[in-house]
Amino acid sequence: MVKKLVIGIDEVGRGCIAGPVTVAVALMPKDFKAPITLPELRDSKKMTRTQREAWYKWIISEGECAGVFVSVSSVTPKTVDRINITKSANLAAWRSLNKMANRCKNIAPGTNVVLDGGLFLKNRRFQEKGNFPFKARTIIGADGKFKEVQIASVVAKVLRDNYMRRMAKKYPNFGFESHKGYGTNFHFVALRHNGAIKGFHRRTFIKGK
């Protein structure tokens, strides 16, 4: 018997003033049961780094054996400045879903796709017209309700956080390892002292700051 599959989509980095916006897609059986050895699965923002990384390690090393597949796309700060953050996040969501569909050919037409918050496939109108084989819904607070969205949330956050830590080594004066590109007081002070990093800070976000 073929198991019914569900898809969850979530993003990380929408509100940052530096770095990419990253969107992950998680495909999994609807009746997925979390391994008892792992921490409680929640919205990634409500998990500790240790908890998120334990889940990420399992997803990458053992997830596919349990029917859990993930795909990820990021959109650069330059593109965010050019087309705005909403369109960038939606574009990343669409790219990630297409990656998943191309990789996993067994996704049945009509499979439910849940997107968190204000995230849409391309845009709201395109998603509502439904010119693709899945049933997509955007639900506020989905990352607190749907396991597939929570797994997507964990993957997106761990990957983006790790990237920002690498950037912190390249640009040690900005504190990316702590704030991950969000507009903290420390970050804005660093901007005033060091100037914006070309191609990495979102100029439309810091204009006038």
Image: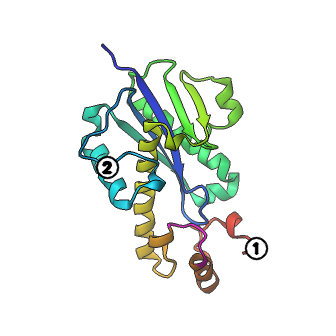
* Residue at image coords 41%, 43%: 151
As helix, strand or loop, the secondary structure at mark 2 comes to loop
Camera-side residue: 51 or 96? 51
Count the numbered circles shown: 2
Residue 208: mark: 1
Of mark 1 and mark 2, the one earlier in the sequence is 2
* Residue at image coords 59%, 31%: 137
Which residue range is magenta in the image? 180-185
Picture coordinates of residue 185 (x, y %)? 61, 77
In the picture, the quarter occupied by the N terminus is: top left
As helix, strand or loop, the secondary structure at mark 1 comes to loop
**Predominant secondary structure in magenta?**
loop
Picture coordinates of residue 107 (x, y %)? 42, 23
Circle 1 residues within 10 Å: few <14, some 14–19, many ≥20: few
Camera-side residue: 79 or 57? 57
Picture coordinates of residue 147 (x, y %)? 43, 37
Residue, disc 2: 39
